[in-house]
Amino acid sequence: MKFNELGLSDSLLSAVESSGFEEATPIQAETIPMVLAGKDVIGQAQTGTGKTAAFGLPILQNIDLKNPNVQALIISPTRELAIQTQEEIYRLGKDEHAKVQVVYGGADIRRQINSLKSHPQIVVGTPGRILDHIRRHTLKLEHLKFLVLDEADEMLNMGFLDDIESIIKETPEERQTLLFSATMPPEIKRVGVQFMKEPHHVKIKAKELTTDLIDQYYVKIKEHEKFDVMTRFFDVQSPEVTIVFGRTKRRVDEVSKGLVARGYKAAGLHGDLTQSRRTQIMREFKQGKIDILVATDVAARGIDITGVTHVYNYDIPQDPESYVHRVGRTGRAGKHGVSITFATPNEMDYLREIEKLTKVRMLPLKPPSEEEAFKGQLSVAEIQIGKLISQTKTERFADMANKLLSEYDATDLVAALLNDTTRDNVKVKITPERPLPRHGHGGRGRNNGRGGNRHYDRNRRSGGGHGRNGGGRGNGHGGHSRDRDRDRDRRRNNKDNNSSHNKNNGGSKRRFTIKNGD
């Protein structure tokens, strides 16, 4: 379904179009009209189905942008998700000048208080920090129109249910409540019954991976070896249409630039690109001027490309469901596909979780040697030179060709041509990303998604703003040094995942459509 069929305003449709999206995901198509009609909604859908826009767009349409009071409160289980949600809603509401603020534990609360004084209409935050602000009277909810509980089952797993109920009791009775959860345990159902008014249930079936046509491999590898090994696979496998998935925007930028430096036709796609640059990349991909698309999960959810032959997971996905979305890009329309996932030794437990979800055992794959990669390049060069000869009017160059043959050995001439046709092994340095936390270290929930160890932010009452809308990263109070160390690690991980946020950044015809995603 197209977004212009959902009842959204022209300004929001323009924002959606600027993001490069045309078709709504199932959760968006069903939820947006209900929310616009003023109904309470329980949305049951997996991660990566476009939930943020499903509630963000109708909220942006129905709040009063001239009213300086907080009109929408979105509760998220983790600071990483809260930041991601705030950024997405800010982008969607940028043309309307909507003010969106994020608050979370483990950062300087004074900066957040100052940011809240700028009168945001929408506040996103973690349960403990939201309660802090309510009790300090720095977050006032008497004018609240919308309450959103995002990933409610995750908040249940993390012990936030009491905090959530305390927050709900501070909100007006006449409000619209939206609850989103991948699963629906009894405790979450009770929240729906107790605090919602005749909620409409929207259930989106989890996307399944058709594995018959996809060969799934993994490579156990050290972080610093990934780039060189991946390019060797390119040279040996000669993929026709390829998507490489990276965990962060910085990763996408560095890997795509490294591939270009080595002579591959590649480009990176992530959320910080302008719409004109995004459109240009997709046009060149469609025309075959780009063979390798390097993308984050969020950016790739918005596109549907036919003819993808290979998917390379440069970084193993944090959520098993994300793997299904990634690998599902290939093996379509009855055509064969290949996926290769690179996993560092301490990320192998994530690989096993993926195998449990897909019910498919990935096969280990031995990396090609440098010699095998070179032979692969020569094979491709042989084909390219053959095509070049068939397309060349040799009589125009006959005199010069004979002159060169009289001065140089024919083998040397051909070797020089091959040298020019094969790729230079340019040294490429990729910044290491902080590895995903291991199982059993940091309280991993259902997915342990979004960038780091989970934490009970209600145990830390000291901090948090974010980037553009204010906030620092002060030290959290409380408890033992181990908790402080984990908090510091999470801040570093969050910095890694967002460090590139402010950076600038011939083949067969390929069909693609733009879709929306989280």
Image: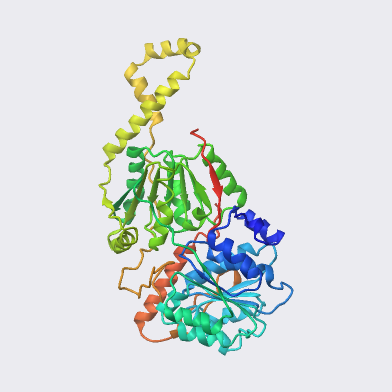
**Which residue does the image show at 49% across and 40% down from the upper left?**
290
**Which residue does the image show at 37% across and 58% down from the upper left?**
316
**Which residue does the image show at 30% across and 33% down from the upper left?**
375
Residue 459 vertical placement versus 59 (above, below): below
In this view of the protein, can residue 439 be seen by the observer? yes
- Quick check: 391 left or right of 12? left
- Quick check: 322 left or right of 501? left
**Which residue does the image show at 62% across and 68% down from the upper left?**
34
Residue 380 position by quadrant: top left
Residue 464: x %, y % from top left? 52, 77
Q: How many marks?
A: 0
Choose between 304 and 401: the one closer to the eye: 304
In this view of the protein, can residue 246 be seen by the observer? no
Residue 31: x %, y % from top left? 58, 66
- Quick check: 108 left or right of 234? right
Residue 168 vertical placement versus 432 (above, below): below
Residue 182: x %, y % from top left? 45, 69
Residue 208: x %, y % from top left? 40, 57
Check the picture and name the quadrant holding the N terminus: bottom right
Residue 358 position by quadrant: bottom left
Choose between 171 and 459: the one closer to the eye: 171
Q: How is the image coloured?
A: rainbow
Residue 189 vertical placement versus 295 (above, below): below
Choose between 221 and 68: the one closer to the eye: 68
